[in-house]
Image (tube, rainbow, N blue to C red):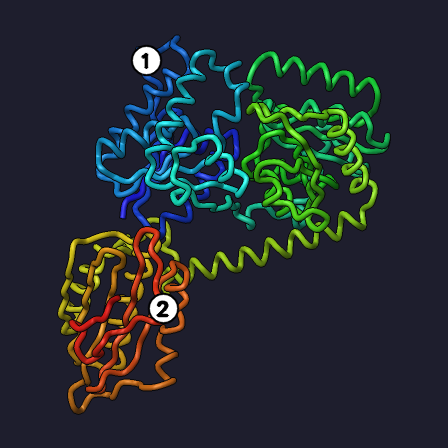
Amino acid sequence: MRVDLLTKEYPPYIYGGAGVHVNELAKVLRPLADVRVHAFGGPREDAEPGVTGYPEIAELEGANAALKTFGVDLEMAQGCQGADIVHSHTWYANLAGHLASLLHGAPHVLSAHSLEPLRPWKAEQLGGGYALSSWAEKTAYEAAAGIIAVSNGMRADILRSYPAVDPERVKVVHNGIDLDAWQRPEGEEAAAQAAATLKRLGIDPDRPTVVFVGRITRQKGLPYLLRACELLPAEVQVVLCAGAPDTAEIKAEVEGLVARLREKRTGVVWVEEMLPRPQLIAVLTASDVFVCPSVYEPLGIVNLEAMAVGLPVVGSATGGIPDVIVDGTTGLLVPIEQVQDGTGTPLHPEIFVSDLAERLTSLATDPERARQMLQTAQESARTALADLRRTVGLLRGEGEKEPAAGAEQRPVPSLSAIADLIADARSRGQHVDYTTLGDPQSPGPLAETVAYRMVQESLANSAQHAPGAPCQVLIVHQEKRVSITVSNSTPPEGTVPMDRGEDREGHGLSGMAERAALVGARLSAGPRPDGGWYNHLVIPTGNNRLPPTPVAPANPEDPGSVAIT
């Protein structure tokens, strides 16, 4: 299966959470699919295979920024020819995904990292182009085959902003990060480099420290934080890793507030450069509390990064932030009542500023409480990572490792690739009959991977435990489900008999069952009357649900008699 990712940001040009997400998403998808990345920013040197960078169209030089974006979108749409799925990120690439779907017939899935109706200040940047970006986003959302919301708050915002969108098409999948990439410096050399970074930036590692990381944009709420910092105890150091201002106006506002803050207190460090990850980790490690004062935040990957390093987070109780912070356990939430005009402006800014300052003070001056939250956040992250790795492991074949860079690509795990499995089995002397019935339909990429792995392991088990036995693979496409049956008869006389009963559990059944559960499918298995064995998988399609009782062949001896109700 070929998956095309469409994005504004991709290395080396990343300035926000959406770019971080797409980069990590591409990494984890590559072992499972043929991944192509289409990105703004022009050609990339030393990019991974399958990455295409598109420059702005020269003829649109001097045009409105939204029109320049649309020009790139047209080229990206053409570049998606041959894709099985197109997956766009942010309004910049949404139109490209929508047009690619119309042009090439591939379903368009989009990830919602933000919404134009909830960022009206974008008009300060785009002028009339804001109407164009809003139109592009609305058109893409209403036509998309599926929408991924990065938080429960984002899902609610989507349905409120675009009431024509079918709620069934909007699913919540939280953004994640690579925890291994966000670790505190270990060893003398790493510690020395971290210390050098702090010295260069003017950060005192011995003072209690509050740190902010984010772009200078209205949604990040930086002006409210700067006012709250005026209320912090004098010994608290404030570190602002803030750059890439949206407009000259907001940059000037922040410059004025920082200057006023420095008149009232020492220890105000403003880092405008985008720090490389090791240097940013050094700054986070030297801090005591991370702050996210956003008035609009679909999730906030920076919060996850801070927690991974070991910082409790104080964040606004808005958008997706409550999905990240467990109030009183991994950080503290700041209540915020907001104007419902799309701007997110606090109804009572003085109260919001005061509550923000109070919660920052409580953690910055109570290291033991912060330490306990740190420990809880890290334990939760390790548990989540273990679960994720286990899930990825389940989707790989038994004993299969992640392919090394440059290794020969195996067939992409999908229903169409099952034919390759069977051809491979036949080339090794295994007798396999293969039948498909009904009009082919896809139950979804993940479910197709589950089906592929079931057939793969069933054939392998048959070859090992019933050598020489004829096998049958039957795939039946029906209106509401797809069923896959792999069975074998008794092996010829003189061969090693097939394992039976409980012993069979050791031959991949538990893994098959767990994979099935991941996608809401159902697995049944057992001996046939002739001494053979069958595995039977039923996967619902669309929004359908399986009946509460297991589904199994009516006559396991005859795979053609599959009973599906």
Q: Can you name the residue that lies furthest to the bottom here? A: 494
Q: Can you name the residue that lies furthest to the top here? A: 62
In percent of width and height, residue 28 lies at 42, 49
In percent of width and height, residue 242 lies at 63, 26
Q: Which residue is drawn at 65% across and 13% down?
A: 252
Q: Mark 1 points at which residue?
A: 58
* Proximity of marks 2 and 1: CB atoms separated by less than 8 Å: no
Quarter of the image where one finds residue 45 = top left
| Crowd tier of the residue under label 2, counting other residues whose Cα lies within 10 Å: few below 14, some 14–19, many 20 or above | many
Quick one: 258 or 169, which is closer to the camera? 169
Q: Mark 2 points at which residue?
A: 512
In percent of width and height, residue 71 lies at 32, 19
Quick one: 430 or 326, which is closer to the camera? 326
Q: Tell me: residue 233, above or below residue 66.
A: below
> Which label sits in the foreground, 2 or 1?
2
**Distance CA(mark 2)–CA(mark 1):** 53 Å
Q: Residue at x 78, y 20 (%)?
A: 261
Quarter of the image where one finds residue 565 = bottom left
Indicate which disc, 2 or 1, sits on the residue closer to the N terminus. 1
